[in-house]
């Protein structure tokens, strides 16, 4: 359970259907322009929804690494891109009872962009400022991608 006293307001700022992995990568590049560190980005959606694909575009858009350098951290748990830990890419899929980013040993993320696949596992304890991105497999190569900003009020 979270222990926040304030209300969280969610503001949707982007909603799109993509029709190919490349289109999702492009959308990730576009999304990067909306991310101002420090920022935690929760990526939510089933296996194959396109979370890692979207992260390729976000990381490239942030200028931290080339899109082909981005791979799924589902075994390694955390990847780090760019110099001085500017961008972290984590995957909570295999983590039982993930409660916070400390579970990942992330200590130096105060000034970073932290991209978290299976971010829904953090529940109410996700740190702010925060962006939530939901991805849904619509069939074939179609994916619905919705991004919202979560702000404390
Ligand atoms: P996740 O990280 O959510 O498990 P991935 O990004 O690893 O998902 O995998 C998505 C899979 O779906 C890839 O094999 C990709 O090629 C395929 N795919 C097909 N259409 C799309 C699309 N529009 N956006 C993203 N991935 C797509
Ligand atoms: Mg993935």
Image (cartoon, rainbow, N blue to C red):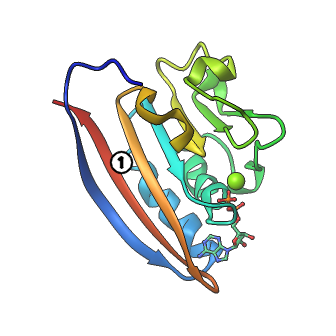
**Quarter placement of the C terminus:** top left
Left or right placement of residue 49 versus residue 131 in this view: right
Residue at the front extreme, as displayed: 1
Residue sitting at x 49%, y 43%: 42
Q: Which of 93 and 23 is in front in this view?
A: 93
Q: In which quarter of the image is residue 4?
A: top left
- The residue that mark 1 highlights is 34
Q: Position of residue 91 (x, y in %)?
A: 68, 40
Within the image, what quadrant is residue 103 found in?
top right
Residue 107, x across and y down, in percent: 60, 13
Horizontal arrangement in the rendering, residue 112 relative to residue 8 (left or right):
right
- Image: 135 above or below 44: below
Q: Name the residue located 62 percent from the left edge and 66 percent from the top edge.
A: 49
- Label 1 secondary element: loop
Q: Which residue lies furthest to the top in this view?
A: 107
Taking the image as four quarters, which one is ligand 1 found in?
bottom right
Against 35, residue 111 (above or below) is above
Looking at the picture, how far across and down is residue 122, in whole percent?
Answer: 52, 33
The total number of labels drawn is: 1
111 sits to left or right of 7: right
Q: Which of 63 and 134 is in front in this view?
A: 134
Q: How crowded is mark 1: few (under 14 residues within 10 Å), some or many (20 or more)?
A: some
Q: Where is residue 20 in the image (x, y as percent from the top left)?
A: 61, 79
Tell me what residue is drawn at x 36 percent, y 48 percent.
34
């Amino acid at each position: 359970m979270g222990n926040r006293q304030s209300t969280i307001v969610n503001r949707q700022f982007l909603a799109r259907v993509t029709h190919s992995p490349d289109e999702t990568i492009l959308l990730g590049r576009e999304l990067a322009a909306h991310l101002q560190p420090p920022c935690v980005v929760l990526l939510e959606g089933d296996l194959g929804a396109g979370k890692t694909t979207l992260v390729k575009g976000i990381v490239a858009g942030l200028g931290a690494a080339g899109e082909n350098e981005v791979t799924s951290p589902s075994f390694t748990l955390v990847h780090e891109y760019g110099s001085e830990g500017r961008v972290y890419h984590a995957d909570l899929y295999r983590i039982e009872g993930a409660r916070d980013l400390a579970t990942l040993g992330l200590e130096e993320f105060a000034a970073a962009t932290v991209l978290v696949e299976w971010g829904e596992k953090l529940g109410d304890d996700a740190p702010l400022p925060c962006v939530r991105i939901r991805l849904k497999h619509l069939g074939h190569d179609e994916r619905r991608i919705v991004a919202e900003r979560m702000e404390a009020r």
